[in-house]
Image (cartoon, rainbow, N blue to C red):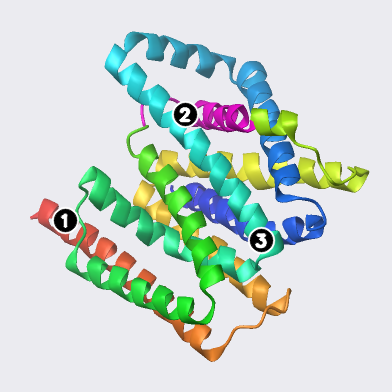
Amino acid sequence: MKSKYYIAVITAFSIWGFFSLVLKSLDSFSAFDILSYRTIGSVLIMLFVSLALRLKALKTNIKLFKSITAKDKRRIIIINVLSGLFLALNWYIYIYVMNNVSVSATSLAYLICPILTMVLAYLLLKEKLFKLQWVSVILSLIGCLLLSLGNFTDLFYSMIIAFTYALYLVLQRKNQEMDRFLVLTCQVFFAVIFLLPFIISYDSPNEKTPFFYGMLALIAVVFTIIPMFLNIYALRGLNSSVVGVFIYLNPLINFMLAIFYFDEKVSFIEAICYLLIIISIVIFNFAAIKNRINRRRAAHI
């Protein structure tokens, strides 16, 4: 029964979709304040889980790492160091855009992200794209270009968020040997290492309040560790391409909140652009699903 894996992935991306409700309550604090406390809090909790609750998995993976070739060790280390860098960049830009630009800009970023991920996978990993998927990429590009005519700033930030996370996802295609929770722990740890010089020298303009610490604890546990864990759990029983489809829950929930909760205005042209991007998403995933069905039919013949 795969229903529990579907429930896990739907819950994970739905939680991330409501992230704006918490972040907007902290818009009086700097993006770097939120980022530094989020990463440090998350890595401390994840290290505790790995050392206290998953010690057997940790020992097994240390043995596995020692048994692989020196070349594979270097590859795994480089991939996870770069992953930590892209996570740190993505989280910082996302928080900054959410609190200083617009909620809809972050929604657009994660609408673009899955298609951008596939294009990067095609360019960097030589993964195949079907003709219909290229049509969806062109439609998405047209939507983005039209959006840039009305508000280049939103599109610019959306593309940076999407690009950093897409690079992170592409790196994970070559990062499958080790336990996923331990890999995530290492990546967040490397993100903290990258941020540490800035954290030490950073002079925060904001006085920290109990509300700030409470919200950051909520972000670390509910909006970072829990959805990450659920995402990892879902990948045990579902193909990564299936899991990837559900990433759209995040921006769609976020976009609805931007319009109906935060009262952000969307022009007719912007609505058409978003519709084009959503159509491109449907076409893109229809091509992938059609190909999987054809392969299954061929396998039964």
Q: Secondary structure at mark 3?
A: helix
* Residue 53 visible here: yes
Q: Earlier in the sequence, mark 1 or mark 2?
A: 2
Q: Residues within 10 Å of mark 3 (few under 14, many from 20)?
A: many
Quadrant for residue 259, please give it: bottom right
What's the CA distance linking mark 1 and mark 2?
36 Å
The residue drawn where x is 35% and y is 19% is 74
* Residue 18 visible here: no
Q: Residues within 10 Å of mark 1 (few under 14, many from 20)?
A: few
Residue designated by label 1: 295
Dominant SS of magenta comes to helix
Q: Which residues are magenta?
A: 176-195
In screen coordinates, is 235 left or right of 50? left
Residue designated by label 3: 98
Amino acid type indicated by mark 3 = Met
Quadrant for residue 73, please give it: top left
Q: Secondary structure at mark 2?
A: helix
Amino acid type indicated by mark 2 = Val
Amino acid type indicated by mark 1 = Arg
Residue at the extreme bottom of the image, as rendered: 268
Q: Earlier in the sequence, mark 3 or mark 1?
A: 3
Q: Residues within 10 Å of mark 2 (few under 14, many from 20)?
A: many
Residue 29 image point, x, y percent: 80, 51
Viewer-side residue, 25 vs 205 = 205
